Image (cartoon, grey):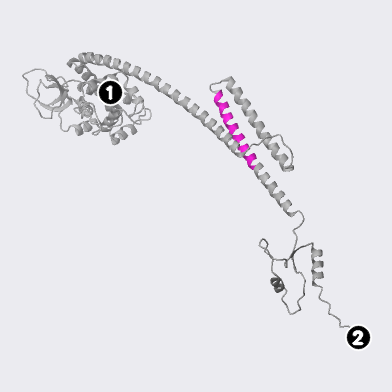
Amino acid sequence: MDGYSAPTTPKPPQISEMFQKFALAFKTKTFEFFADDDNNNNHLSDSDGFSLLDSTEDFITDQKVVVIKPDPPPNSSSSINNSFRNETIDTQIADSLISSVFAAVSSFEASYLQLQTSHVPFVEESVKAADRALVSHLQRLSDLKRFYREFRKNPNFEAGLSLGSCLEAQVQENQSKLRTLETVSNRLQEEIDEKDNEVSTLRKKLAEIQWANTKLSKKLSGNLNSACDVLLTVRVFDSVLHDAYRATRKFSKILIDLMRKAGWDLDLVANSVYPDIDYAKKGHNRFSFLSYVCLGMFRCFDFEGFGLSENEPLCNGGTCSLKQLLEHVSSSPMELLSRNQNSEYSRFCEKKYQELIHPTMESSIFSNLDQNEVVLNSWRSLSIFYESFVSMASSIWTLHKLAFSFDPVVEIFQVERGVDFSMVYMEDVTKRYNLPGQTRVKVGFTVVPGFKIGRTVIQSQVYLSG
């Protein structure tokens, strides 16, 4: 046996030792894969274990294979839980804080509106209560602000302020909004009640005014009836007609003087008005001017609206015309023009002036006057010419309203040239034809128209020729 060397057995690879060192280096856990299978565990079988080490190398018998799984960092799960818990707490506190702020602001708004309402009407106790509520809400907002600052510095500090839940804060906010709406509703209801009282008062005043108007209307109707008995007579109409005739003669005289001062040939003008008239005297041409003015002013006298407007609604005579007559004579003509320049009387004056004094005639008369004379720019100037025209227009306007107050309405007529003179319907304006039995003469032109009131005739004044 000496000298015999026993065969040496190759040393198996130290795989187990390597894995043990690897596991100790990384502080791992080990799981055995060659444990016996049972119904409760899902371990691998022996054959499965060897298949994991399938390689060209020799199999190692009775060797356990381990799988290495790194351990998680120390205290990792606890730190994650703590971080999640802290974030949850911060979110809950923030939500509660915001809800509390909104609830405090809504309460402040409701209390402030209640304070304003308590001043009108002033109620001392309500004002004091609302003031105390305002102070408490401001204090609450200040506490919430202080809590927020401290919480941002130290989330773990202990505060004596109770925030409550978000739902509680929302309930408080909605209650404050309801208080605000209730206050506004009460104020609006008070205003409605006040307006109702004003409406009731105005209705009472309206009823009183209507009752007073009814009394005045009855009284006015009685006065109009009595005025009709006094005014609507032939004598009154004839008197007003004579006033209009005198005013027309005055204006015609002023117009003739202005034309003479302007250098007009009066004979030529008279002949242009009524040609081929054999005047009895030299100065009788003034009757042609008087006729021109008078007939121009009485033109459209038989129309109720005096020819002012075809589409304008006019009264139907009678009481309406009598009222207008009384209103017109109650004030001076100058005052009526200055009071309302768009009235019917103002438009009547404007229209008649444009018919009588056309622009060419006006320019010739007023521009050729001497500088020492009174300068008359137009008929609206404050002058004798203006006043005489307004007075004439007022007298004829009054006569027109009086004529349409009669029932039936007074009729107007004028005599054409060449008609035989009739003492029933005509009167010689020169007073020359007075004796009956003289040679029958013809009418040269009408100076003043005549009128017929029922069966009564007011003669027309005419100038006779031949």
Quadrant of the image for the N terminus?
bottom right
Question: Residue 455, position in %: x, y?
Answer: 11, 19
89 in relation to 412, above or below: below
Asked if residue 224 is positioned above or below residue 48 in the image, the reply reads: above
- Highlighted magenta segment, given as a residue range: 94-118
Could you say whether the residue bearing mark 1 is in a helix, strand or loop?
helix
Can you tell which quarter of the image residue 9 is in? bottom right
Residue 108 within the magenta-colored segment of the rendering: yes
- Identify residue type, mark 2: Tyr
Image spot of residue 331 (x, y percent): 32, 19
| Residue 123 drawn above or below residue 92 | above
Q: Quadrant of the C terminus?
A: top left
Q: Which residue is mark 1?
A: 394
* Mark before the other along the chain sequence, 1 or 2: 2
Residue 190's disc is: none
The residue beneath circle 2 is 4
Seen in the image, is 366 located left or right of residue 61? left
- Location of residue 5 with respect to 93 vertically, above or below: below
Give neighbour class at mark 2: few <14, some 14-19, many 20+ (Cα, 10 Å): few
Report the residue that reaches farthest toward the front: 1
Kindly identify the amino acid type of the residue bearing the numbered disc 1. Answer: Ser
